[in-house]
Amino acid sequence: MGSYKSYVLTFSWAVYLFETYLSYRQHCKLQEPRRPKAIEGIVTEEEFEKARQYGLDKSRFGFLSSTWSQLENSLLIQYEFLAWAWGVAGSLIGYFGYGSEYEIFQSVFFFVIISLVGSLTSLPFSLYSTFVIEQRHGFNKQTYRLFFEDLLKGYLVGGAIGIPLISVFLWIVKSTGEQFYYYVWVFMLLFQVLMITIYPTYIQPLFNTFTPLPENELRKDIEGLAKRIEFPLTQLYVIDGSKRSSHSNAYFYGFFKNKRIVLFDTLLEDSTNPEICAVLGHELGHWKLNHVFKLFTISQVHLFFLFYLFSKFIANRALYLDFGFSDTPTLVGLMLFSYIFSPVESVLGFCMNVLSRMHEFQADAFAEKLGYAEQLKSGLIKLHTKNKGNMNPDVWYSTYHYSHPPLVERLNALGIKQE
């Protein structure tokens, strides 16, 4: 076994074992039947028990799915699945009369093959998660027909976006020489801005229906909040999230002076108008405090750094040989580089979670300054109990995995101490 392959397999198993240990710690916490003292004044025993059972079901399933994923990935790496898929893609383009010199064409077929294989192996887990676990706990609203319609739409949209993206990416790499990392980064930056622009307007409506919020008291309250903090609100929508799930959410999107707010219909059903405004006060706090721009800027620095490092690996023939390749196709090289760089990505992912939790506290404080402390408290509690969130998190598990602070930490930060 080559040194690169050994390195990738060793590290992936080390991460798997570490994350499994953290999941075991969390599973032990979920097995505790009594409410932690910190939440006794927040949620009832019945609400806690429902959340605990939901968490236990997801935890058990998580052990199975993560183990399967680790075994599958290890076997695919060990037995050089990528090299096999590349060979199959080469045979397919040969059937159409094209040779190996048509690397972009072969890469597109390669992308389709590995995407289909990945989707097929993950499908049983998606079905079980949706129609057993989510169904058992009252969240799933999908039918099998809607599930597979969404799946098909996802494939079509993914292909319509992914195939041109890969083609242009490879063309840029081939056309711009050793400095390709700069041009690829500029292209990806423009592509991300394009997707942020068109996704909510043209892609998400393929899956959900957006309805303007009627002229009512809630609309007046939200427009008043937006005006108060100078948020350039242009549209206010309700999305039919209940079509698929009873989980609740709200978000905003748009550039510059064209901002839009989207409320899940499940949020409207479960919360009062002041609570909805408090939740939006938190979300708009992310905008006011420039969290979105800061995270976008960090992601661009990260992306540029990745492409620069990839330019140093792209011609490393030993890397390709270790994984069963006799040539050096660019798309394959990018995938192999992602294997090699995964230790750094793990650390960066943890750091981004730390930053995200800090931003959540800041957004809560912003909503508090708007006068929504009590409403945000009750809104957070309702959302947490409605979504059956983890009410007894293990500190190691939450520190490593959570991008949002645990409920009690958020309430305490708001100055709302629990006895």
Image (spheres, rainbow, N blue to C red):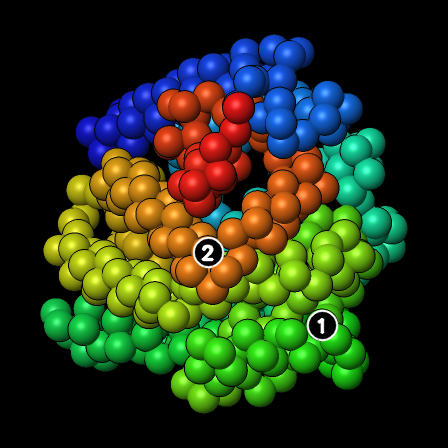
Q: Residue 304: where, in percent of width, then height? A: 21, 64
Q: Is residue 179 visible?
A: yes
Residue drawn where x is 53% and y is 78% of the image: 226
Residue drawn where x is 41% and y is 85% of the image: 256
Q: Does 54 sit above or below residue 204? A: above
Label 2, label 1: how many angstroms apart (C-alpha)? 19 Å
Q: Does 328 sit above or below residue 339? A: below
Horizontally, is 330 left or right of 81 in the view? left
Q: Residue 21: where, in percent of width, then height? A: 43, 16
The disc placed on residue 218 is 1
Horizontally, is 14 left or right of 391 in the view? left
- The local secondary structure at tag 2 comes to helix
Q: Amino acid at mark 1?
A: Leu
Q: Which residue is mark 2?
A: 368
Q: Does 9 sit above or below residue 238? A: above
Assess disc 2: are there few (<14), some (14-19) or many (≥20) residues with their C-alpha within 10 Å of its C-alpha. many
Q: Residue 356: where, in percent of width, then height? A: 37, 49
